[in-house]
Image: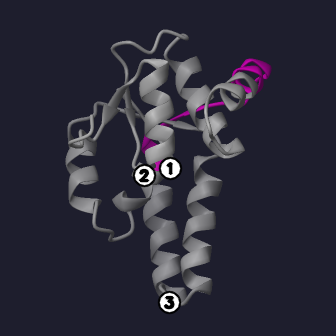
Amino acid sequence: MKFWDTSAVIPLFLEEPESPRMTEVARQDSGMIVWWGTVIECRSAIARLRREKVLTTSQEDQAIRLMSVLAEAWTEVRPSETIRNIAGRLLLSHPLRAADALQLSAALTWAGKQPRGHAFVCLDHRLRDAARKEGFQIMPIWPEN
């Protein structure tokens, strides 16, 4: 099982340059773990693309349907006081936005605060760097890893 950041989930239901790579990582995963807010982050990205006229309304509806099917199979890390506290520490330690701190905090909580040996799937450079520094194995593997 791997923890998936929203940046890596979106290419699974929207055609993006990283879609083939993320699809392959997903095929090798026995079960996706995501943060509770991932559905809202995905919906935000889909709506933004429709507003920017990258997606039609029909394509937006299809993306929401595909994301919903994917969401039925993943496991969510629910919000908690622990996640909020860890996210606060992460904001002091890394140059993260609030949502990214919550993502990484959820991953750390899922890993029992022992990230060594656990995979973190992410396409966002800043979040990848913070997760690596926290001890996660970062996926997909890029040349700088």
Residue 81 lies, with reference to residue 11, above or below; the image says above
Instruction: Give coordinates of residue 137: x percent, y percent.
Output: 33, 25
Q: Where is the C terminus found, in terms of image quarters?
A: top left
Q: Earlier in the sequence, mark 1 or mark 3?
A: 1
Q: Residues within 10 Å of mark 3 (few under 14, many from 20)?
A: few
Of the pair 46 and 59, the residue shown nearer to us: 46
Of 25 and 142, which appears nearest the observer?
Answer: 142
Q: Give how far across and how far down residue 6 sits, in percent.
A: 50, 50
Amino acid found under the numbered disc labelled 2? Val
Magenta region: 70-86
Disc number placed over residue 9 in the picture, else none? 2
The image shows residue 108, relative to residue 44, as above or below, that is: above
Q: Which residue in the protein does label 1 denote?
A: 6
Report helix, strand or loop for mark 2.
helix
Tag 2 and tag 1, C-beta contact below 8 Å? yes
Q: CA distance from mark 2 to mark 1?
A: 5 Å
**Which residue position holds label 3?**
56
